[in-house]
Amino acid sequence: AAEGSAPPRPFQQHLGSRAMGHAEKAAMGTSDALRRSQSSGALRKSGEMTLTGPGSPTGSSQGALTKHSPPPKVPKYLSVHALTRRRKLSASTGNIHGYMAEDYHQVNWPLPKMFGMEKYGYSLIDITDPRYLKECAALSKKLVRLQYDQQIIDLEWRKTYKALLDAEHRQDTLPANAQQKTKDTLKKEVEGYTKYLTDLQEQKDMYQLEVVEVYSRCDEIKLALKKEGDLEDLRMFMENRTKDSLSADNAFFRMKFNIHAAGGRNPGSTFP
């Protein structure tokens, strides 16, 4: 308290102790409710091992992280949590995993904004599960580099394609009495642009294959997370249905369950 202020009155102390008592009761009630809503630890751990074991797509090099863990630290420009605004392209464009990077919202220089509005700015993977945050940050970094190079290739491809159309037009509009040297020069020019455009198209396809590979990995992660969520919803549904069908003082709730077989592990079983 500030110096010179009056000491608290007994009535105020009584109110304070009552408020603290209510807060403690509410906290105890919340923890009891959480304990009642959870299944046995063995069953929950068995389900997590099935979903995140070494052979499953969700269990690869995730360490001790769970979906409720605090997110690991990643560079700010690769973090979904650092976004001030979340914006995606239409699903018809094929870019269904990428948010527009934060740089395209903060930088006022018009060139990145122009390219961002087109397609190159949507490079931040939208998966926020802590177990995959570092992997998705690496994928986002890869997308940033791929789309940076794609800008250069696409721009060169457009310039070459326009030059090819112009050369073909000049070749098609040559007069009938044009010199053979002029015809050969234009033919050579058209062939040169065609070959260069073919090389650029091959490079575009290579970059696009790399982008598709990143998106395929995102699809795998989202499918695994969806499966995990569906199994958890099924578990909660079955648990609540059992609770609703039995009274609160039923002996069923005092039984200890063991998911392991009584005689040891069954031959051919995939569960521990």
Image: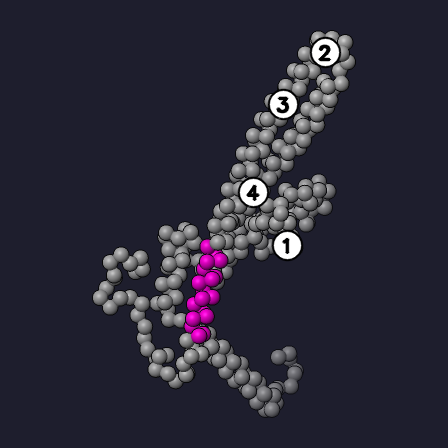
SS at circle 3: helix
Amino acid tagged 1: Arg
Frontmost of labels 2 and 4 is: 2
The disc, 4 or 3, on the residue closer to the chain's N-terminal end is 4
Name the spot of residue 120 as percent of width and height, x first.
Answer: 63, 42
Q: Residues within 10 Å of mark 1 (few under 14, many from 20)?
A: some
Q: How many numbered marks, from 0 up?
A: 4
Q: Residues within 10 Å of mark 4 (few under 14, many from 20)?
A: many
Q: Which residue is mark 2?
A: 182
Q: Which residue is mark 1?
A: 86
Question: For residue 143, which numbered disc appears in the image?
Answer: 4
213 or 242, which is in the foreground? 242
Residue, x 61% and y 36% (percent of image)?
150
Q: Which residue is mark 3?
A: 194
Residue, x 64% and y 49% (percent of image)?
90
Residue, x 37% and y 55% (percent of image)?
53
6 or 44, which is in the foreground? 44
Q: Check the image and report above or below for 262 versus 17.
A: above
The answer to whether mark 3 and mark 2 are in CB contact below 8 A is no
Give the alpha-carbon distance from disc 3 to disc 2, as whole Å.
18 Å
The answer to whether mark 4 and mark 3 are in CB contact below 8 A is no
